[in-house]
Image (cartoon, grey):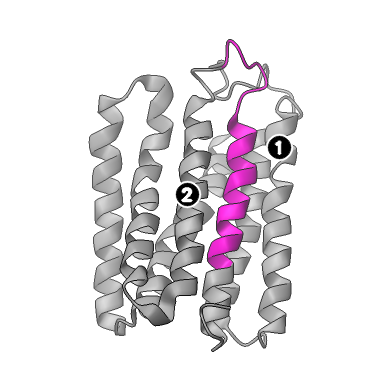
């Protein structure tokens, strides 16, 4: 991995990561596609709209970080991702599982604690070039667990399928993120840009699940 953190970046110039920067447009496309779906579903689902706006923020924040890697752009990149992941988990507990507000809040806090514990516990065990992916392990487990739980409910078959597919794509996405450093010598372009493209797909699938379920339509449609 190069000195600036990602394989593609060779220096401090604004466009030193063109692929990593431009592929953030996929997040904006995913958010726009979800916005159209949200409007067709009635345009009244405020929780889904918040999730949708966070996807816009993810694309913008990641673009800023991959063009101007500084502490404030790192925060602009990481914070929307964390907010989306934990907020969506809470939304899923309430909307898909049907938990009441108190149980949803406690469940979300438990997931945050689990994610932080897994990240802090796993990162020291990994080689330095792989530690950046440790914090995403809980999100993958969360998607798999939620899909497995919903599969037990016949009325949630469609939602379970979307979240399960999102989990599979995220597993592939996380693999490419992790390989960016180890493969740098043989793949100078790196693989982080594939993380962007695949994650945009993941986020669209999750938004679609939330919007279709929240609109009152059958989850299998």
Residue 139 within the segment the image draws in magenta: no
> Judging from the image, what secondary structure is the residue with disc 2 in?
helix
Of residues 80 and 122, the one drawn nearer to the viewer in this rendering: 122
Question: Badge 1: few (under 14), some or many (20 or more) residues near its Cα, within 10 Å?
Answer: many
Q: Check residue 71 in the rendering and tell me which mark sits there, or answer none.
A: none
Q: Residue furthest front?
A: 154
Residue at mark 1: 21
For marks 2 and 1, give the one nearer the viewer.
2
User: Where in the figure is residue 188, as x and y percent of width and height?
Assistant: 65, 16
Circle count: 2
Q: CA distance from mark 2 to mark 1?
A: 24 Å
Residue 193 within the segment the image draws in magenta: yes
Magenta highlight range: 184-207
User: Where in the figure is residue 43, as x and y percent of width and height?
Assistant: 67, 85
Relative to 131, say whether 30 is above or below: below
Residue at mark 2: 168
- Quadrant for residue 87, please give it: bottom left
> Judging from the image, what secondary structure is the residue with disc 1 in?
helix
């Amino acid at each position: 991995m190069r000195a600036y953190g990602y394989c593609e970046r060779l220096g401090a110039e604004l466009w030193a990561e063109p692929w990593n920067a431009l592929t953030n447009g996929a997040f904006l496309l995913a958010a726009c596609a979800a916005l159209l779906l949200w409007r067709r579903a009635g345009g009244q689902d405020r929780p889904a709209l918040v999730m949708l706006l966070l996807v816009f923020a993810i694309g913008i924040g990641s673009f800023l970080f991959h063009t101007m890697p500084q502490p404030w752009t790192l925060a602009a990149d990481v914070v929307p991702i964390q907010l989306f992941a934990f907020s969506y988990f809470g939304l899923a507990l309430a909307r898909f599982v049907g938990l009441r507000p108190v149980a949803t809040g406690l469940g979300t806090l438990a997931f945050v604690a689990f994610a932080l514990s897994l990240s802090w516990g796993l990162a020291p065990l990994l080689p330095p070039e792989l530690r950046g992916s440790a914090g995403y392990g809980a999100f993958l487990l969360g998607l798999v667990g939620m899909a497995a739980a919903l599969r037990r409910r016949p009325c949630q078959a469609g939602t379970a399928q979307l979240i399960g597919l999102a989990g599979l794509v995220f597993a592939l996405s996380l693999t490419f993120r992790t390989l960016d450093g180890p493969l740098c010598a043989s793949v100078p372009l790196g693989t982080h840009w594939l993380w962007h493209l695949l994650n945009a797909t993941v986020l669209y699938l999750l938004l679609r699940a939330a919007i279709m379920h929240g609109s009152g339509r059958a989850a299998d449609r």
